Every structure is written in structure tokens, then in C-alpha cells.
Amino acid sequence: MYDVTVIIPTYKEESNIGRIVSEVDAVFKQHAINGEILVVDDNSPDGTIGIVNEQKKTRPNLNIVVRQSDHGLSQSVADGFVHASSDIFVVMDADSSHPPVLIPTMVSEIRAGYDIVIGSRYMEGGGIQKWPLKRRVISSGATFLGSLLFPDVSDPASGFFAVRKSVVADAPLKPRGYKILLEVLGKGTWEKDKEIPFEFVDREIGSSKLKLKTIVEYAQQVVDIAIFSGGHHKSAAWQEWKKIIKFGLVGLSGIVVNMGVLWYLTEFVGLFYLVSSLFAIELSILNNFVWNDLWTFKGTRQPWLSSRWHRIISFHVVSAGGLVINMGVLYFLTSIVGVYYLTSNIIGIMVGFGWNFLLNRNITWVKGKKS
Ligand SMILES: Nc1nc2c(ncn2[C@@H]2O[C@H](COP(=O)(O)OP(=O)(O)OP(=O)(O)O)[C@@H](O)[C@H]2O)c(=O)[nH]1
Ligand SMILES: [Mg+2]
């Protein structure tokens, strides 16, 4: 049994594997960590396997799994979880994009009680070196999609992370594609996560394997986790769904208020219908605010917005923006693109809803200390 297993998935890494193995092992020695290095290779046709076998002669803590079927990065890492001989796993690339010096920190954070420790490129202090624009755009897209599921994780698509064995041991992982971390976050059993920043260094040698298929698989994975979390009400992603659903229900209640007030003021008070509508809109916004404040975003208030008036004003500004966006989409799709106006309006409502939800979640009710 080892203290920790560093899992390194490889495919055709003959020019990198020797270096990363000795670097990781040096870190183990420096910090007196009884660590295992587990290379999980997809039967690379180059010299990768031979180099690892050669190094094994002088490094008893180095092991290799050579996979013969179901080729894939995520599958390989999941296989590593099964073959590792320890209770703490660190996953990292072979091409020195991930700094081995962070391994001891990750391990001690797991020991301190965190279930998952993520090496983040997107938090303060982290970064990416030498990436072409195309890679940055694709990566940001992947990160954005992932953050819909895990809004509190800055880099849910990171390939560098540590995880306690119990998180993944019984998890129904469906590994595919490149982003095993998302799968672990979505299907694993965990409560506390921590991110530590690191500077991602692009590979210098060897070839990249990123393809269009990777992007499609990733989108499928996000949908799969979203559906999974709907049936597993303890998962982190479900907490986010719950807010979206509550926000939607509150929005529906707002429509009822709006219609009711419009009808009452026009029929019984005798106001001109557009004047009634002004009151109707304002009352529905107030209705939505109160429900969202007491129910949807309960317990997620940040001190600087802790006064209710700030939140009311912020909610009004966001709602006004949502209305403009809804009408803008309606106009654009109907008059410029030529879409049937009721269809345009459904799309407009959805875009406006997305705007309202995201801005209110991130500005009006900033996640922070409970008040
Ligand atoms: N076992 C296995 N490992 C893989 C596979 N594809 C990639 N890897 C390894 O996974 C790690 C990350 O792959 P990279 O190709 O470096 O991916 P990337 O960092 O997104 O792209 P680059 O810019 O090319 O570095 C490396 O250690 C690869 O050798 C695969 O299909 N099977
Ligand atoms: Mg790489």
C-alpha cells in the first residue's frame, strides 16, 4: 500500500514519459512521500511502454497498465483508479503541462479533509502559457459549459487534480472523452473541494490529440451529468438545478400576478390598460423578488449586498435588461431573420430567462457568506 498514486495516462509519449516519471519520483523523495507512479498506456505503438519497463528496473514504485481495448483518455484514468494501490489519487498529464511540485500540497489538502483538490488554470494565480487563440477559445467554452453544472469550480475541465479513493470507488462513472474530472465531480461522492492555482505549460514535444470528436463527447458528457444529477438529489450539480427550477417557478408566479393585476386594474378600477400594465409589471417584479429572496437564493447573500434595498435595485436593473433582451431577440428573429413571431418569442423568453438567472445569481444574490 502506498500513501498516494500518481496516475499518468499516456498515448505515444516516448519523448516525455521518462522525464515526468523521474520528476514525480524526485518530488516523492524530497517530501518523504511513499508514492506510487501508475502509467496507464493505451498500447502506444512508439517506445513509451519500453521506456517505462526499463525504468521499472530501478524504480520499484513505478507500475504500468497497458490497455488493449476501449482506447481513450478518460477510460484510462478510470482504469488507473481501479489499479492504484493507495487511497489518494493524483491525475496528471505526461507532457509536463502539470507541475509535479504541487503534488505534496494536493496530498496534504486531501489529508486535511478535502475530497477533491483541483489544479486550476482559471483562478487567481493560475494561467496558461503559450496557447494559440483556438485552444483558448475551445478551453473557455468547455470551462463555461462545465461551470453551468459546477458554478463554484473555476476549472471543472482541468486534467490535474487529486481525489480521495472513496469519491470514485463506487461512482457510476461513464468515462469518455477528455474530461474525466467533470465525470468525477458529477458522479462521485464528495462534499468538500478545493482549488489551487497553477500555470499550465503547453507541451513542447509530441503531438496533441484534440479533435472535433472530443468537443462533441464533452457536450454529451455535460448533458449526461445534468440528467444524472436530476435523479441524484445529493449531487453538487443538482443544487444548481434546484435554483434554476425555483427561479423558473417564481417567474411563472410573476406571470400570474402580472395578468391578475392587469385584469383587475383595467376591469374594476377603470384604468387605461397600458397604465394598468405598468403597475402589473412592477408588482410582478416585486413578487418575483420576494420569492427569490426568501426561497430561490436563500442563504447565499454577500455582505456588500446584504441590505435588501441593494438587492431590490439590482433585481430591477437585471429584470429591465432581461425585458430589453427578450424584445431584442423577438425583433431580431422576427423582422430580420424572418422567424414566426411566436417562435421568436419563445427563444426570446429563454434567452431573457438565462440572462435573468445568471446575473441575479452572480450579482444580486452573490454566493457568499450566509446572512
Ligand atoms: N491512455 C491514454 N492517454 C491519452 C490518450 N489521449 C491522450 N492521452 C494522454 O493524456 C494526457 C493529455 O493529453 P494531451 O494530448 O497532452 O492533451 P492536451 O494537453 O489537452 O493537449 P496538448 O496541447 O497536445 O498537450 C497526455 O499524457 C497524453 O499522453 C488516450 O487516448 N489514452
Ligand atoms: Mg498536453
Image: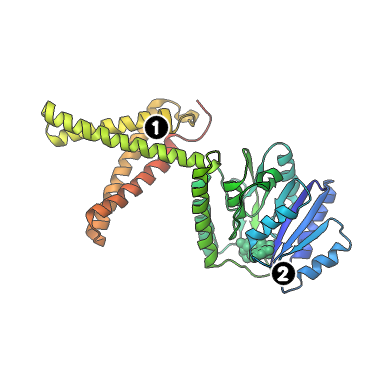
Q: What residue type is labelled 2?
A: Asn
Q: Which labelled disc corresponds to residue 64?
A: none
In the image shown, does 91 or 242 lie closer to the viewer? 242
The total of numbered circles placed on residues is 2
Q: Where is residue 279 in the image (x, y as percent from the top left)?
A: 22, 31
The answer to whether residue 298 shows anywhere in this view is: yes
Could you tell me which residue is drawn at 66 percent across and 47 percent down?
168
How is colour applied across the structure in the image? rainbow
Q: Does the residue labelled 2 lie within 8 Å of ligand 1?
A: no
Q: Which percent across, then down, holds residue 218?
A: 53, 58
- Residue 292: which numbered mark, if any? 1
* Residue 133 visible in the current orientation: no
**Mark 1 neighbour class, 10 Å CA radius: few under 14, some 14 to 19, many 20 or more:** many
Density class for disc 2 (Cα within 10 Å; few <14, some 14-19, many ≥20) is some
Q: Residue at x 22, y 54 (%)?
A: 341
The earlier-in-sequence mark between 2 and 1 is: 2
Looking at the picture, how far across and down is residue 216, in whole percent?
Answer: 50, 62
Q: Nearer the viewer, residue 163 or 277?
A: 163
Q: Which one is in front in this view, the residue at disc 2 or the one at disc 1?
A: 2
What is the quadrant of residue 289 in the picture?
top left
- Give the left or right position of residue 337, taking residue 37 as reference: left
Where is ligand 1, by quadrant? bottom right
Image position of 146 (left or right of 78) = left
- Alpha-carbon span between mark 2 and mark 1: 54 Å
Q: Look at the picture and state if 227 lies above or below 210.
A: above
Do callouts 2 and 1 mark residues in contact (Cβ within 8 Å)? Answer: no
Q: In which quarter of the image is residue 42?
A: bottom right
Element at badge 1?
A: helix
Say whether mark 1 is within 8 Å of ligand 1. Answer: no
Identify the mark at residue 43; answer none if there is no mark: 2
